[in-house]
Image (cartoon, rainbow, N blue to C red):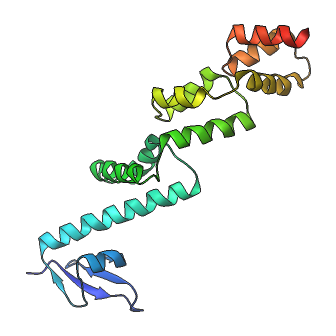
Amino acid sequence: MASAVIRRGAQGDRWKAELPDGSSFFIPPDLVLEFRLHAGMELDQETLESLCNRCEEYALRSKALELLSRREHSRKELKIKLLQRKLDPDIIDRILDDMEASGYLDDRRFASLWVSQRLRKKPEGMLKLSAALASKGVSREVIQEVLQDVDTDQALSRAAEALSRRSGMTDEKLISALMRRGFTYPQVKAWLMRARS
């Protein structure tokens, strides 16, 4: 007994599998070719399950690429977004592995871009940048590699300039504000001494 029948969509350019309960799902063109489907073909349960798994994987890969086309993501960020779709974590991991191997997903590239954008918009110190990257799932090794190229003095100067524009900003308040942005006390004190001399 067939568990699904393959039909062409109303306009002839889309394919769908109709299930005995009256429900149906669309099949991507690549999978029509892969499974050698044709109109009126009846699928047994095993083939249907295989087709469903491949359709799920195809949809998941498409969603991952869509998210990456909007902006870079760390692997952890992308995995969390895909898990929210209630899909199989093993399939998600396999797809993310493939995307890393093909260069679509790269934590090092993500971290580098994220840090450069962050330093342009709101300069912060290494402590805060490192913690933020770690929360996004970037490894310590990659964080250290990306942050070694950051000019801390320049970031500190830019942050201090922005904060100094606020009215009533005393040296003590400036030091506290810069430390909240992830700069260490010795860094801030040394910068302040150079700036005041």
| Above or below 89: residue 172 | above
- The percent coordinates of residue 116 (x first, y second) are 67, 38
The residue at the point 75 percent across, 18 percent down is 177
Residue 45 makes an appearance in the image = yes
- Please give left or right for residue 48 compared with residue 92 in the image: left
In the rendered image, the vertical position of residue 78 relative to residue 11, given as above or below: above
Q: Residue at x 78, y 25 (%)?
A: 159
- Asked where in the image residue 59 lies, by quadrant, the reply is bottom left
Above or below residue 89? Residue 120 is above
User: Which quadrant holds the N terminus?
Assistant: bottom left
Residue closer to the observer: 21 or 72: 72
Residue 84 visible to the viewer: no
Horizontal arrangement in the rendering, residue 69 relative to residue 60 (left or right): right
Q: How many marks?
A: 0
- Seen in the picture, residue 57 relative to 71 is either above or below; the reply is below
Q: Position of residue 75 (x, y in %)?
A: 44, 43
Residue at point 74%, 26% (across, down) = 155
Between 29 and 157, the residue placed more toward the observer is: 157
Q: Quadrant of the C terminus?
A: top right
- Is 74 on the left or on the right of 89, as rendered? right
The x, y position of residue 120, in whole percent, is 74, 37
Residue farthest to the left? 1
Position of residue 39 measured from the top left corner of the image (x, y, whole percent): 25, 90
Quarter of the figure with residue 87? bottom left
